[in-house]
Image (cartoon, coloured by chain):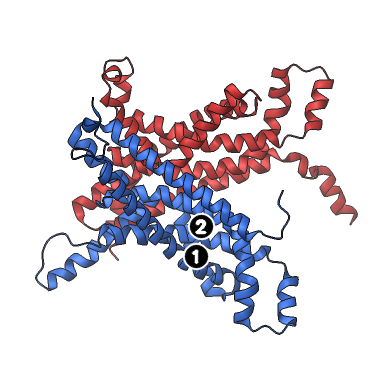
Amino acid sequence: MTASDFVLGFGEAGWGTALLQAAMITLSVALTGYAFGLLVGSFGAWAKIKGGVLPRLIADAYTTVLRGIPDILVIYLFYFGSSAVLTPLAGLFGISGFISLPGFMAGALAIGLVSGAYQAEIMRGAYRAVSPGEIEAAIAAGMSRLTMFRRIIAPLVLRHALPGLGNVWQLVLKESALVSVTGLVEILRQAQIGAGSTGQPFTFFFAAAVLYLAISSFSTWLLRQAEGRLALGTRRT
Amino acid sequence: MDLPFLYETLLKLLTGVPLTLQLAVSSVGLGAVLAVMLALARLSGLRLLAWPASFYVFIFRSTPLLVQIFLIYHGLGQFHAVRTSFLWPLLREPYWCALIALTLNTAAYSCEIVRGALLSVPSGQIEAARACGMSSFTLHRRIVFPLALRHALPGYGNEFILMIKSTALASIITLMEVTGLAAQLISESFRAIEILIVAAAIYLSMNFIVTRLVQWAEYALSAELRPPPAAASGQGATL
C-alpha cells in the first residue's frame, strides 16, 4: 500500500480532509449545545437557589427527568418531535413530506437541554461553596447586587464549578456522537459514510475514536490551565 | 390527550424492558469483575500491570460509547482473521456486540469507583489483619472487599443508572429494547412526542426503582452506623 492509496490520507482518494471537517462540525455542535446548556443551567441553578416554590419545583423536575432518561430519547424528541409539529404546519402552506428541525439545531438543542440539567446541579453546589462571609463583606463594602455578582459571586462560583463543568464538557463531547442519528455529518456520521463506501469499517471507526481522543485530551489540558488560573491565591495540594 | 393510544404504546414498550434490564444487569455484572481486576492492577505498584490498566481506562472513558459499539459490531468484521475465528458466531450478533461494548465501557468507569473504594480502606484495618497473620487472599476476602463495597455502593448506583441509559444505544445496532421499540413505533405511527414521553416515563421508573434499591442496600450494609434496636428503644423509654 502506498501513501496515496491510504484511505485516511489527504490526497484525492483520501478521507482525511473530510474527517477533519467533520471534527469541526462535532466541535461546533458540542460548543453550541454546551453554551445553550450553560444558559439553561444558570437559570436552573438560580431557580433552585433563589426561586419561589414554583420555579424550584420546575427546576427540580427538569434536572430529575433530564438526568434520568437516555440522551438519545431527547435527540429523537427534538428531531422526530419537531417533525410531528412542523410537518402538519408545513402542510397548511402546501408543503408535503418530512419536515424537521435541521440536525445541527435539533442536536445542539438536545445536548443543551441535557447538559443544562447537569450544569444546574454543579452551579448550585458551587454557589453553596461560596462562604457567607465573602457575601457579607461585599454587602458591608456597599456593593450593589450587580457589582457583587460580577466581582465576588461569579468568579468564586466559577472557581468551584470549573472541575464539574469540565466533566460536563467531556460528556457533551461524547454525547455529540449521538447527533449522527439525525444525519448531521459530524465525526461518527462521516466515519459511517467512509466505512460504507470503502468497506473498511474498522479503519474509519478507529480514526473517529482517535479524533475524539485528541479533542478530549486537548480539552483536559486546556481545562487544567484554566483551573490553575482561577485558583490563583488558593492552596493547591 | 389520547389515553388509549398512550396505554397501547405503554404495553408495547414494556415488552422491551426485559432486554434493557438484561443488558444493563449483565454488563454491569461482567464489568464489575473486569473493573476489580483493573483496579487491582492499577494499585499493584507494578508498572507493567498499572500502565496498561490506566491506558485502558483512558481510552474507554475518552471515546463515545457509540463509537465503541460501531467498532465492535461493524469494525471487527473488516478482518478476515476475525471472520474465520471461532468467535465470529458471537461477534456477528448485535446482542453480543452490544453486551461486549457496554461491558468494556462500564469496566473503565467502574475501575475508578473500585480504585477509590479500595484506597479508602483505612490502613489500620489492613495492618491489624496482617498482624493477625491473615494471608493476602483472606485479607482481601474478609477485610478489604467488604469495607470497599460500602464505599463503592453509592458510586456503583450511579454507574448502574448510567448503564440503563446507555443500553438505549443498543437500539442503533437493531436491538429491540425500549428505545428500539419506540423508534419502530415512531416510524409506523409518526406520533413521536407521545411515544417518546411514554419511553421516558419507563426509563424514569426503572431508574427510580434502582435508586431505591441502592438506598436500601446502603442502609442494610451500614448497620454499624445505627444504634442497636434494643438500645434505641430502651433510650426512648428512659427519656
Q: In this figure, which residue is indicated by the disc labeled 1?
A: A41
Q: Position of residue A40 (x, y in %)?
A: 46, 67
- Left or right: residue B99 versus residue B29 is left
What chain is tagged by disc 2?
A
Depth order, front residue of A75/A60: A75
Name which residue type carries label 2: Tyr
Chain A appears what colour? blue
Q: Position of residue B28 (x, y in %)?
A: 49, 34
Specify which label sits upstream in the sequence, 2 or 1: 1
Query: Is residue B106 placed above or below B5 in the rendered structure?
Result: above
Q: Which chain is red?
A: B
Q: Position of residue B9 (x, y in %)?
A: 29, 52
Residue A105 is tagged as: none
Secondary element under disc 2, as helix, strand or loop, is helix
Q: In this figure, which residue is indicated by the disc labeled 2?
A: A118
Name which residue type carries label 1: Gly
Secondary element under disc 1, as helix, strand or loop, is helix
Query: Is residue B36 placed above or below B178 in the rendered structure?
Result: above
Q: Are marks 2 and 1 in contact (CB under 8 Å)?
A: yes
Please tell me how crowded label 2 is: few (under 14), some (14-19), or many (20+) other residues with Cα within 10 Å.
many
* Quadrant of the frame with the N terminus of chain A: top left
- Do the residues marked 2 and 1 share a common chain? yes
Query: Is residue B70 placed above or below B8 in the rendered structure?
Result: above
What residue do we see at 28% from left, 49% from top?
A181
